[in-house]
Image (cartoon, rainbow, N blue to C red):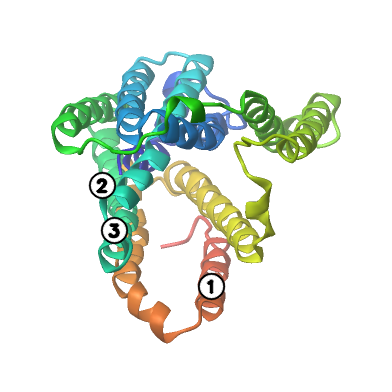
Amino acid sequence: MLDIINVASVTITLPDIMKDVGFKVDQLQWVTSAYALAYAALLLIGGRLGDLFGHRRIFMLGVIWFSVWAAFNGFASNPIMMSVGRALQGMGAGFTVPSALALLTTTYPSGPERNKALAIFGGTGAIGSIIGFLLGGILGSTIGWRWMFYLTAIIGFSMAVLGAFVIPSEKGVSKVEDRRIDVVGIVSFTLGIVAIIYYLSEGPAAGWRAVSTLAPLIVGIALLIGFIVYENKIDYPIMPPHIWRSRRLIASCINIIIVTANLNAMLFYSSLVLQDVLRYTALRNALAYIVHGVGIIILIAFMPRLIEAIRTKILILMGWLFLTAAGVVWAQIDLHTS
């Protein structure tokens, strides 16, 4: 939940961060992109390290790392400092999320108890977004966005201390002979993703066909192709090739990528439109977003029954219809929108 709170609160305060830190409009995306990029790149590593050295230990280290760089971001005085700090903070989230999921699945046995725990885990994301929106709105409208990062750090350090007493120790952590790490796979995958996301982030400003953006794209694609080839040749891959034989997994991943990209783009640009064009305060902006989180919470409460009553494909299609309708409505926003 902590990383969701941080992402939501940062989204609300983007206009203030842009003015105070000195970002240009086309650079502002790095406040969120640097975080997301590091987070995505470290998910595989975080999960693997948890398998090797214990998910409890990696989770605790991730929370502490996340909190240190949250505090650092509160002191950011220029775009480079903020972007680097956000990337390092995202690394912490990349360690905590897979470890948290693993702790849930190892703590609760397979069946209703685990399903309930995972449903609650999913619900905390929506609750975290509501808290984050309110936190960013209140602090952004009063004592300033920097305190949003300071408070996140305080909460994170408190969680680390509490977790040391509450999170149970694990059994069955990998033995020494299993502790091989696919360094080549990790590096090639991470750099490949970074290069491609850099192209997507810088393309609108520098030009999609500019050498400065095309070169990273080509390098990124080459690295990912090399990653796939290499993973098929070793016996301890970070991403076992056989998992991609599942069409459901491929479809689910594509679905998540598109939905998440759509949602993050909407939140990013709507914050700028609502505050810089429609002159909303940060708090009013936050209140406008709360409906989003409330809708998710309500749906999650009914989701177990819906899954039993309706085919998954139908539910996904319904979700896409609602998402498309929301996009059409958002596209109509102008100076006279209420």
Which residue is rendered at x = 28% and y = 70% of the image? 301
**x, y percent for residue 327:** 56, 64
Which residue is rendered at x = 49% and y = 47% of the image? 273
Q: Quadrant of the N terminus?
A: top left
The residue where tag 1 is placed is: 316
Three-letter amino acid code at the position of disc 2: Ile
Q: Residues within 10 Å of mark 2 (few under 14, many from 20)?
A: many
Which residue is rendered at x = 31% and y = 75% of the image? 302
Place residue 188 in its image quadrant. Answer: top right
Q: Is residue 245 left or right of residue 271?
A: right
Spatial separation of the CA atoms under disc 1 and disc 3:
28 Å
The residue where tag 3 is placed is: 109
Q: Residue furthest front?
A: 177
Front of the two marks 3 and 2 = 3
Three-letter amino acid code at the position of disc 1: Ile
- From where the camera sits, is residue 15 visible? no
